[in-house]
Image (cartoon, rainbow, N blue to C red):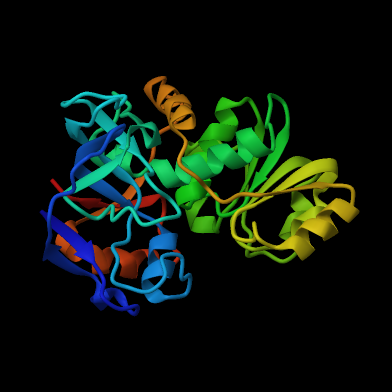
Amino acid sequence: MRAVVQKSVGGPEVLEVVETDRPAPRGGEVLIRVHASGVNPVDVAVRSGAYPLLGEPPFGVGWDISGVVEVAGPGARFKAGDEVFGLPFFPRAATGYAEYVAVPSRQVARKPAALNHVEAAALPLAALTAWQGLVDAAGLSEGQRVLIHRAAGGVGHLAVQIAKARGAYVIALASEPKHDFVRGLGADEVIDYRTEGFLAAVGQVDVVLDSSSQGTASLEVLREGGVLVSIMEHWNTALAAEVEAAGRRFAGISVEPDYASLEAIAKLVDEGRIRPHIAETFPLEEAGKAHELIATGRTQGKIVLTVA
């Protein structure tokens, strides 16, 4: 099979397509013929060495996958021919940029019927991050006010839709050229974070979803007892202590595989309440170009590699 691997850390040029052995599923695992693989900022950070999550190369990056079960191992949740999507093994190596991946069947879920494989591959990491932050950690409920940073990005554009599906009032931060896009996702208010004193326009909120390392900046709009959900600074114990000392709750989120949440997300997709936005697709051989684009930090929605 073909798979993208890297033998050293560095720029996008270190990503190369190689021929390697097809993995064999063990008990409880499924072999998935991958049709599409999502590309995320963490992939770029791992490839470059900025985030040494996988240790020393060689390894393959990529976690988001959507495809068809080729072989089901003994005791697996699925059978051959089932369409599935998921975030296998994160934060360990999954080598998701590949034609075949063998994964635990409880780390994937049935693909939403309303989506093709490219669209489904855009969901797992970003949607699970938003879900685990807003639903699991913050317990976001109907009528609450939530502030979402980087609302046009991969996590942000799905977080807006998940929050609206929960009945929340959504205040979204995005650059002015992306306001129409974010409003189209259902945001109740959209504010340009580049304007001076932009937080003054927010008012008090119950939950802040911070994917931009703002530290304690959002505390001025977070009501007493509210929740600061931090994605990029989930490890920051000093920040957590400062938030708690201010009478707010800190929730650091490091996304993990979760088939039950994927099933809940898929249900909302099939009900027409969540839809991933695809910014651009690239063939497997152009994974480096996909990394170049996502590294700009200006993409709207998700980038996906087409595999099969």
The reply to whether residue 172 is in sight is yes
Please say if 261 is above or below 191.
above
The reply to whether residue 182 is in sight is no
As drawn, is 28 to the left or to the right of 230? Answer: left
User: From this viewpoint, which residue is outermost toward the top?
Assistant: 271
| Image coordinates for residue 166, horizontal then vertical, percent | 60, 26
| Image coordinates for residue 149, horizontal then vertical, percent | 61, 53
* Residue depicted at x 35% and y 51%: 63
User: Which image quadrant is residue 226 in?
Assistant: top right
* Residue depicted at x 24% and y 71%: 15
As drawn, is 242 to the left or to the right of 4? Answer: right
Q: Nearer the viewer, residue 69 or 111?
A: 69
* Residue depicted at x 72% and y 36%: 145
Please say if 290 is above or below 273.
below
| Image coordinates for residue 266, horizontal then vertical, percent | 40, 27
User: Which image quadrant is residue 40 in?
Assistant: bottom left
* Residue depicted at x 37% and y 51%: 302
Q: Quadrant of the C terminus?
A: top left
| Image coordinates for residue 194, horizontal then vertical, percent | 63, 65
